[in-house]
Image (spheres, rainbow, N blue to C red):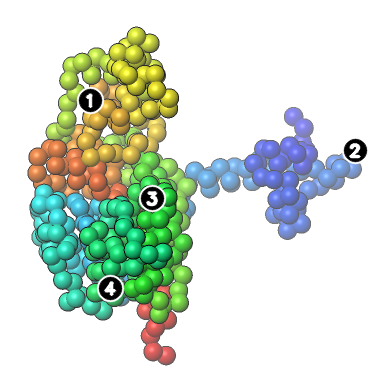
Amino acid sequence: MNKYLTLSEASKLIGKSKETLRRWDREGKLSAVREPISNYRVYNRVEVQTLFTDFLIKDTKDTTSNYAEPENDYKVLELFAGAGGLAIGMEKSGLKCVALNEIDKWACQTLRKNRPNWKVLEGDIKDFDFSEYHNNVDVVAGGFPCQAFSYAGKKLGLADARGTLFYEFARVVKEVNPPICIGENVRGLLSHENGKTLQGMISILDEIGYNVAPFQVLKAINYRVPQKRERLILVGIRKDINLKYEYPKPHKKIYNLKDALKKGDLFENNVPKSEGAKYPKSKIDVLDLVPPKGYWRNLPLEIQKQFMGGSFHLSGGKTGIARRIGWDEPCLTLTCSPAQKQTERCHPEETRPFTVREYARIQTFPDDWKFEGSMAQQYKQIGNAVPVNLGTEVGYSIVKFLNLYYNLSKPR
């Protein structure tokens, strides 16, 4: 084996561009030498391999951290709280939940059962006045549903959005006047009504005194969640605050289904046993034929035609149909019901939907977080939730923002 590597060979081995290697040579990080016979500049193979090993170690070890310690007691008011995914995440990041509003009675029971000290405001948000929290809360957060607005003019104002849940979100922000507000939604909001809905929301926040940070779609798999779920984050910063909000940095390590359900980095034990939905025998007979990471295309042709019916001849991959998840991949986005034909999420080894506790694990809920109501209600609460670990990482980014804001606003 040749002792030396050319620039091209070193570049290929280490996965860095030739220009990067030239810069490293100038900086003395990885020095090229003159090859004794040809006098070309070459690299010592052992030195390159040592550096390459260092890169491998760094890449497999996730060194990213968004952690931030709150320097004050920061308070959150949460709207559309659901079963508490975002609220637990915020709590883990050190933010204090002063009150949560939710209309679904089973989700409210879940919140009360797990956190008896939380103030749960059960009922329609329209029926609540939040002015008691005026200038007394640091964050208003919530996942308002995506609804179309009726436009009264070119620029949408708060009054034009009346009757929508975003109107209520904005009304509460105006009543409470926090330094920062965070709304989260599905990625589809970007294209809803050709983007007009999102522009309307931005103009409403502008009207009530908030600048909107450049919005981002956060992929849950980049934030310690073993699930391919995406959430659009909308951040409003009060106009008297001249600070930039920084989104949490993505982690290098991607977790998969095995990390969700087995003992490992994410959880200290295997997933607890729990109740779960069942497939009818006709569906079991079909899904038994699908391998892990496979879907309806992996079925024999005759069964494909029979199972798919009229949609067999339609275009599009329809990759969620008869889909069995593999251990070594993140789960696809969970829905409110574990056995819908279009969005199948079958267990890798057993021919069944994920159980309630498996669903909760994939959403990174702690095992001691209990869900109230029927099994269908529990699945619905978990499927609708913001993944807890994503909520924690967003929480850290808010803590960093608030630390900076209160440090700058202290009298000197």
- Quarter the N terminus occupies: top right
Q: Is label 4 or label 1 in front?
A: 4
> Contact (CB < 8 A) between labels 2 and 3?
no
Disc 4 packing (10 Å; few <14; some 14–19; many ≥20): some
Which residue position is annotated with label 2?
37
Residue in the picture at 35% in, 36% down: 332
Please give the label number shown on residue 352: 1
Q: Distance between the residues labelled 4 and 3?
A: 25 Å
Q: Which amino acid does label 3 sit on?
A: Glu
| Horizontal and vertical percent position of residue 96 | 24, 67
Q: Distance between the residues labelled 4 and 1?
A: 47 Å
Which residue reaches farthest top? 302
Mark earlier in primary sequence (4, 2): 2
Residue in the picture at 58% in, 46% down: 55
Q: Is residue 59 left or right of 188 when viewed as pictured? A: right
Q: Which amino acid does label 2 sit on?
A: Ile
Q: How many marks?
A: 4
Q: Distance between the residues labelled 4 and 2?
A: 76 Å
